[in-house]
Image (tube, coloured by chain):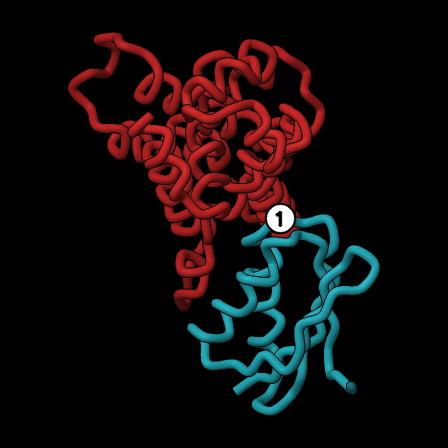
Amino acid sequence: MQEASTTKRLSAEDRRASIIEAAKHLFARSGFHGVSIDQIVKEVGVSPAILYRHFKSKEELYEAVLHEFSCTRESYVETVVADDIGFEQVLRGMTRVFVTSIINQPDLLKMEMHSQLEGHVASQEFFLNRWKSFTDYIEYNLTELINQKKIQPMNVEAASLIYQGMIREVLLLKCLRSTNRLIEMTIDEIVDEIINLFLKIITPA
Amino acid sequence: MSFDAELDAKGLNCPLPILRAKKAIGELSSGQVLKIVATDPGSVKDFEAFCKQTGNQLLSSAEAGGAFEFMIKKS
């Protein structure tokens, strides 16, 4: 009873935030379909009625979790406003911002993995959209470099896919798996090395 | 509002609209205005931050029909 009276004192806003926080961990662990409203209310320590006062459905709660992630969306502005900054520096800067953001919220990566299997349309769009910053940047700039004859013609969409695949794999390796692979390197070192290799592919000597 | 150059960044995710705006502003003279149209909701915050950091003036920022329109005056 003591606990119930403590939890009651939370403002509506704090209550909403605590539900989102608990749901985030559960969705990250088990995906959208793997979590029931029952589990969420148990985790938060409230009644289903209170949860439904804030969110009409599990769907709405899931979207609120995604929305919260989107509010912390990486800003690349600082990375790109510096003078005389070229393709390579921007790509390194953006990647560093993105990787740091995922390391700080691995739940985001876990939810992305679940959403890939679950085929939840809204969430697939949400996660694709995060990668789109990279694919847009790479495709636009490679096209420009090709037009200026600074690099050889290539399929720029395939090139951006290569990049997305490499970075995602590093994140999976370092954030979700316990393995000895590349254990002696930090995530920043691996990312730097991978970018070097990528640049070699697109600008062969 | 009149403008001197226009940049269509619809369908592109940040930071590409910012980078293209930076380049377009580089080609303007001081006091000239660049109009940018983007669709990425993140562009609203990003153009505010961009103007703050570069000293260019964000004259207006408006949403219409799912697109965001920005007017930036070169410092």
Question: Picture coordinates of residue A116 (x, y %)?
Answer: 60, 16
Residue A55 image-quadrant placement: top right
> Mark 1: which amino acid?
Asn
Q: Eyeballing the image, is B31 above or below A171?
A: below
State the residue position of label 1: B13
Query: Few, some or many C-alpha atoms within 10 Å of disc 1 (few <14, some 14-19, many ≥20)?
Result: many
Q: Is residue A52 left or right of residue A102?
A: right
Residue drawn at (43%, 27%) of the image: A22
The colour applied to the residues of chain A in this rendering is red
Chain B is shown in which shade? cyan
**Outermost residue, bottom side:** B31
| Residue B25 horizontal side relative to residue B1, left or right | left
Q: Residue furthest right?
A: B65
**Horizontal and vertical percent for residue A175?**
33, 22
Query: Residue shown at 41%/68% (left/top)?
Result: A83
How many labels, in total?
1
Q: Position of residue A154 (x, y in %)?
A: 63, 32
Q: Is residue A65 visible?
A: yes
Please say whether residue A154 is visible from this viewpoint.
no
Q: Vertical placement of A195 versus A182: above or below?
A: below
Q: Nearer the viewer, residue A198 or A34?
A: A34
Element marked by disc 1: loop
What residue appears at the point 47 percent right and 32 percent down from the top-left corner?
A19
Q: Is residue A57 left or right of residue B64?
A: left
Along the line of sight, the residue nearer the viewer: B26 or A203: B26
**Dividing the image into 4 quarters, which one contains the N terminus of chain A?**
top left
Chain letter of the residue carrying label 1: B
In the rendered image, which quarter contains the C terminus of chain A? Answer: top left
Q: Residue at x 20, y 16 (%)?
A: A183
View extreme (front): residue: A1
Q: Residue A37's image quarter?
A: top right
